[in-house]
Image: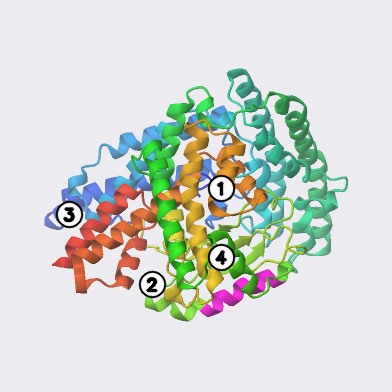
Amino acid sequence: MNTASTGQFIRIRYVLLGLSWLALGACAAIRTTPPAAAARQLDAVFEDYFEAYLQLFPTFASEIGDHRYDHRLENAISAEHLAAQKALADRTLARLDQVDATLLDAERQLSLSVLVYNLKDTLDGFKFPQQLLPVRQLASFAVEFPLLGESGIHPFKSAGDYDNFVKRMQAFTAWIDSAIANLRRGIAAGIVQPRAVIERTLPQIDAMIVDDAKSSLFYRPIERFPQSLNANERERLTRAFVDAIERSLLPAYRRLANFLREEYLPKARDSHGWSELPEGVVWYDYLVRNQTTTELTPEEIFSLGEKEIARIKSEMERLRSAGGFNGTLNEYAGALSEKAPRGYSSRAGLIGGYQEIQRKLEPHLAKLFGAIPKSRFEVRTIEEYREQSAPSQYWSAPPDGSRPGVFYVNARGIESNPRRASEALFLHEAIPGHHFQISRQREQSDLPRFQRFADYTAFTEGWALYAESLGAELGLYREASQNFSRLNSELFRAVRLVVDVGLHRKNWRREQAIKFIIDTTGGGESGASLEVDRYIALPAQALGYKVGQLKIIAIRAKAQAALGGKFAIREFHDELLKDGALPLTILEAKMDRWIERSLR
């Protein structure tokens, strides 16, 4: 996720052939033609940028399967680190400006355009002090650091792996102290989180604070030692983990919890919109551009949301009429729910339900896709300390296959409130949504690495929402409530366009936003408040879903109209995905070129 933690990286392997002085002449002249020289120049910039980025963000290196920096943990909110990030972007842009793009092949031109787009967007972002708001219930190191070990991003296969994680636990205290210092500076500058965000976050921080180190989330790797470790190593590592938890992590989390509760919460603002912050109007405009990768204004997005709500509601009404039901949409949804098969009342049962969806779907994939990724994924329920605030989500697999991706399902309260496995959610988070698209991208070894590991919200989330619409062609949505649920899922994403802009540009109150979601979707207050607090904490992030989906649908419609009988859905999907996540403006231009080639 662009906001959750990924960056843009590039690796293009090339070979420099050594020639003896006797071999110089015509052959050397051929090898040093301007196009070849320009390509080598660009490759060198790409490689230098990638290596520098990995050193700046070692946890990302771990995520993509590069474990050279597993002993390090970035403090990305410190002044020193922020300066290094900006310097890297400035330096790389200056070097890219020296490359003659007209001498490059089409693939390198695409890579160049994407990296330039990303770096300019990054520099635009440095105009705003996001580092003064580092703690929230989502997409914050404060609550997601434990997942570095739990998700498998940090490996635990050797004694060295355990030693490296001890170093990371010890280094995490620097991030906590920087976060507290930044939050204090934010108070002084009038840049503070809304009260609702801190109230959501505090229980998650409190969950990290335990009386016994052995009950800590961070102790769990000790409970699953690999068999290769002998008794002496196990004893030493156990002591090291307990020491790091007791001397580093617990005191740091206590400092953060006490600060948030006693000093920050009383200063938290009662307003909710980003526009209430200093320079908040232009800040939100930037976030909208960053998350949608378009030039759409907040007003245009608000209007788009209203139109999409009306369109989807009309589709729901047609489904209700076709089913011969005479009541309201809410009554129809209730009737479908009553007739639907009973949901699961255990976490294991829910996981099994999603695995059954996978077995049902996979035989149909070849109808829509020529290239199928090899990476595996697991279905897990979100950890209980996160489930009160975290939505279902996907954590990607590295390209080397060393660990699977993880489709996290929120099973909050399932024991008292049985839940069905959602086909639309599976399509979105797993196949052919996030797991399929991201794995396909990361397995493309011929792509520059910045494209292999890029993440643009509007593309990745737009693709995942588009993937929900493919269910009928993949053997799903045969049961009426699942099909209606798909439309409700899309409706929910349209509502986000209205609510996010309403909160951050139109001065909507939190209660007003919650009521709008309930009235429009028929959902409950608990789910609506969870979503609204997400939009408050991560402004504009929720806009990418619908904007990206609509762009993909528009590109597909353009291709079908232009190609007529020559249009093939497998080729369209493969072309759309083959270059990885792209800014929507660049994606559309790329697909226009594909349409032109296909017409020849």
- Point out the frontmost of discs 3 and 2: 2
In depth, the one of 587 and 312 nearer the eye is 312
Find out whether the residues at labels 3 and 2 contact each other: C-beta distance under 8 Å: no
Q: Tell me the tag on residue 371.
A: 2
**Prevailing secondary structure class for the magenta stretch in the rendered image:** helix
Secondary structure under the numbered disc 3 in the rendered image: helix
Q: CA distance from mark 2 to mark 4?
A: 39 Å
Find out whether the residues at labels 3 and 4 contact each other: C-beta distance under 8 Å: no
Q: Earlier in the sequence, mark 3 or mark 1?
A: 3
Location of mark 4 (residue): 332
Location of mark 1 (residue): 517
Secondary structure under the numbered disc 2 in the rendered image: loop
Identify which residue is drawn at 78% across, 42% down. Answer: 206
Q: Which residues are magenta?
A: 349-360
Is residue 12 in view from this perspective?
no
> Is residue 265 found left or right of 85 in the rendered image?
right
